[in-house]
Amino acid sequence: MIIAITPDAPQATTDAILAAAAASGLGARTTPDGHGGALVGVDGSLTGDILTLPGVDSVHASHKPYMLASKEHRSPSVVRVGTVRIGGGRPVMMAGPCVVEGREALLDAAEAVRAAGADILRGGAFKPRTSPYAFQGLGEEGLRHLAAARARTGLPVVTEVLEPEQVELVAEYADMLQVGSRNMANFPLLRRVGKTDKPVLLKRGFSATIEEWLMSAEYVLASGNPNVVLCERGIRGFDPLLRFSLDLNAVPLAKELSHLPVIVDPSHGTGKRSLVARMALAGLAAGADGLIVEVHPAPDRARCDASQTITPAELAALSRSARALHATLAAAGTAAEAANVTLADVAVTA
């Protein structure tokens, strides 16, 4: 059950609903509705006078299984990472090396991506690798380097957390916690990041359906963290020429079903440096709220994912193209709205 609460409702109304749910043995939690009010999600049904308290706007017994992630009864969300806003405006660019290789290398990369148009610095301190013998990252030392890069450049930091036991440590250093594709269904991890006050970047599992992806987001939201950004990063295909197949259908569909912002990862989604820029722009054209791209000053010498990593110069060109595309799409949207208004006026006059 979803109970919509008006912006001017007394706090006593929300408290009473939560207390009634608890008395009935039901879980319940609140989330902003995007209009100044709130939604109370209840794991079951409440009846009686509790549903007619002052400030109760509407009651919905039927809803999507991902009731907090659903776009039903609420407007699109904006997630803030430091001073950066994701959703509802200019597309955000997250960029940096796949993995933190060392302090000076990261500082150089951070300055380069900032100059090339990045809003947020990405970089892995803990890396899940297919081979146990591959470089796994620098751990806490890598986190300290990320913090130094933030201090140097002013860019907020997003980095991956692999295990529930790492969440508090990573949250000490990072501005945004990334849950990677392999961990999309790691429910203890989702619950733990849901109890932090850090925004969460949730990558879609490479064999996950869109509903499974949204249900994973629901775990984070239900644990108390409303700041979730979805990331489409490609799904497993059958063509050996591509690492993954970037599923751009998922972008408008996820935004149709959910109020959460959606970004695209064209680096993992293709696995090929030559395809990254074009698929990044395709993702923005599909409606993505931003991009996360692997960038290294010398991609061929990168210790991780070299084949899908672009240079800072290529990022700068992509940033310019992304801004131009956004302006074009915004102008087209404005023109379409004006045309619709004109047609409506004609219809009324007729």
Image: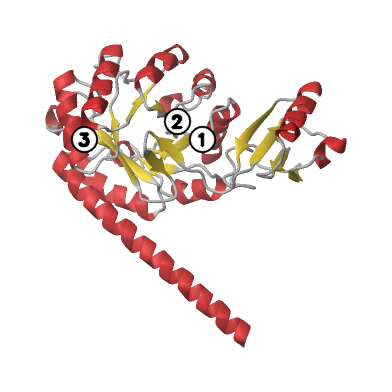
Q: Nearer the viewer, residue 274 or 109?
A: 109
Instruction: Tell which tag, 3 or 2, sits nearer the viewer.
Output: 2
Residue displayed at 74% across by 32% down: 12
Percent coordinates x, y for residue 27 in the rendering: 71, 25
The count of marks equals 3
Q: Nearer the viewer, residue 298 or 228?
A: 228
Residue marked by disc 2? 199
> Quick one: which residue is furthest to the bottom in this view?
350
Amino acid type at image mark 2? Pro
Mark 3 or mark 2: whose residue is earlier in sequence: 2
Instruction: Tell which tag, 3 or 1, sits nearer the viewer.
Output: 3
The answer to whether the residue labelled 3 contacts the one labelled 1, judged by CB atoms less than 8 Å apart, is: no
Amino acid type at image mark 3? Val
Q: Separation of disc 3 and disc 1 at Cα?
A: 26 Å
Please determine whether, in this image, residue 349 is positioned above or below residue 226: below
Residue 137 showing in the rendered view: no
Question: Where does the N terminus fall, quadrant-wise?
Answer: top right
